[in-house]
Image (cartoon, rainbow, N blue to C red):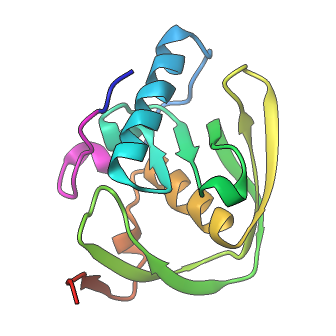
């Protein structure tokens, strides 16, 4: 469909709590298509709708071919979590920086898919971290507020 502009740190929309999606309609499906185009252009592993200026509870995660199909989840909620691990995170809305963030190592996430059907994901490792990071975006939270330190990336 279309590559959209990714909002950058400082844009107030990134600090907004997103609205729940009432119905999966053509508008939401077009949004998902645009999110996919935008994510792949940006070379990220996850994108939340508010990062492209749409304040709806829609998340896309794609960890690459080894991890299977991309995940699109609408109205996601973390219903269980365990473990705690610190690791580096970056963000397409804060390019050129990374920070160490504590996240659960295991999460259960529920929501609906693009067909409007309930889905549940039991995620571990990087997928669990990605779910937490993207769901935070839906609450207006960027990883930097959870990071102990943020570092500017430099080419070596």
The magenta segment: 4-14
10, above or below 138, in the image: below
- Res. 18 in view: no
Front in this rendered view, residue 81 or 5: 5
- Rendered location of residue 28, percent (x, y): 51, 19
3, above or below 28, in the image: below
Front in this rendered view, residue 118 or 33: 33
In reply to whether residue 7 is colored magenta, the answer given is: yes
- Rendered location of residue 22, percent (x, y): 60, 18
29 on left or right of 141: right
Q: In what quadrant of the picture does the N terminus appear?
A: top left
The number of discs equals 0
- Rendered location of residue 88, percent (x, y): 46, 81
At a point 51% along the width and 54% down the height, the residue shown is: 134
At a point 33% along the width and 88% down the height, the residue shown is: 149
- Rendered location of residue 52, percent (x, y): 32, 37
At a point 42% along the width and 45% down the height, the residue shown is: 40
Rendering quarter of residue 20: top right
At a point 50% along the width and 28% down the height, the residue shown is: 32
- Res. 153 in view: yes
């Amino acid at each position: 469909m279309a590559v959209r502009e990714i909002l950058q740190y400082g844009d107030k929309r990134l600090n907004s709590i997103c609205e729940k999606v009432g119905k999966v309609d053509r508008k939401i499906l077009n949004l998902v298509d645009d999110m996919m185009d935008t994510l792949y252009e940006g070379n990220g592993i996850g994108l939340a709708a508010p990062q492209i200026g749409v304040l709806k509870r829609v998340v896309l995660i794609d960890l690459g071919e080894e991890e299977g199909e991309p995940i699109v989840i609408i109205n996601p909620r973390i219903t269980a979590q365990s473990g705690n691990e610190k690791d580096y995170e970056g963000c397409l809305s804060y390019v050129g920086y990374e920070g160490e963030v504590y996240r659960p190592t295991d999460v259960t996430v529920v929501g609906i898919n693009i067909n409007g059907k309930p889905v549940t994901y039991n995620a571990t490792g990087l997928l669990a971290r990605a779910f937490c990071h993207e769901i935070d975006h839906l609450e207006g939270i960027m990883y930097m507020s959870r990071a102990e330190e943020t570092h500017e990336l430099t080419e070596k």
